[in-house]
Amino acid sequence: GAGVSQSPSNKVTEKGKDVELRCDPISGHTALYWYRQSLGQGLEFLIYFQGNSAPDKSGLPSDRFSAERTGGSVSTLTIQRTQQEDSAVYLCASSPLPVQGYGYTFGSGTRLTVV
Amino acid sequence: AQSVTQLDSQVPVFEEAPVELRCNYSSSVSVYLFWYVQYPNQGLQLLLKYLSGSTLVKGINGFEAEFNKSQTSFHLRKPSVHISDTAEYFCAVSDSSASKIIFGSGTRLSIRP
């Protein structure tokens, strides 16, 4: 498609369960980012993938969070043993390089609710 | 390290009135600046960006922003707002050495009829 696609758009899960969030970036975009947006908060950087380089995981809040990007395209963000504080909108963005020249293109996000 | 400060968390204005959303940044090197808009229940959309050249940048939907290096500001303006401009606006910064963009905490613009 023409944009960044995220699925599911909404996810309700029970505390302690694992969840997987998917991001399909724009074809040809080398860089892929995950951000988290909690209610009333700004965007919190989670992780960054660039081509075949090692990802920048410096924003992951705990070891319950992990992400991978297969074949330089689709990315999956996994949250294990979900907690209520994980409830947020998870945004994926992609960009050509250099990112400064283009800015990000964001997906519509996945709203995660942990009950 | 880069950072962005959006001085107002909420800005209420009347329809057809002008608006200015304030943004200040800190960076030790040349910067690239962005404004994004997030309409209710949607992702973020690029409104405009400053890379170099003219300090007055025009974006979509009649918005513009002015880069002021001496004041380290990149304020967003619109001369006359519409109900459809109701959204959250994020200022963001990057620099030539960075691999990602740093976002401010956002300003919620609410338009009163």
Image (cartoon, coloured by chain):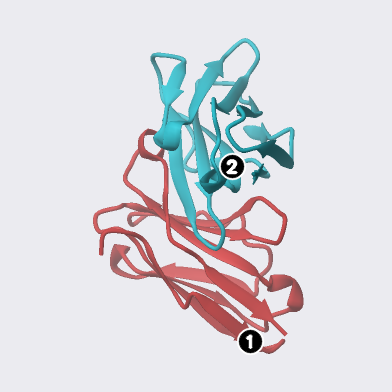
Chain colours: A red, B cyan
Q: Name the residue located 67 percent from the left edge and 84 percent from the top edge.
A: A81
Please, what is the three-letter code of the amino acid marked with disc 2? Answer: Phe
Q: CA distance from mark 1 to mark 2?
A: 29 Å
Above or below, A113 against B9 in this view is below
Instruction: Give the foreground label among 1 and 2.
Output: 2
Element assignment for label 1: strand
Relative placement, left or right, of B40 versus A6 is: right
Position in image of residue A80 (x %, y %): 62, 81
Element assignment for label 2: strand
Please, what is the three-letter code of the amino acid marked with disc 1? Answer: Thr
Position in image of residue A12 (x %, y %): 61, 84
**Could you say which disc has been placed on residue B90 in the image?**
2
Q: Residues within 10 Å of mark 1 (few under 14, many from 20)?
A: some
* Residue at the top extreme, as displayed: B70
**Could you say which disc has been placed on residue A13 in the image?**
1
Position in image of residue A50 (x %, y %): 38, 52
Q: Name the residue located 55 percent from the left edge and 63 percent from the top edge.
A: B41
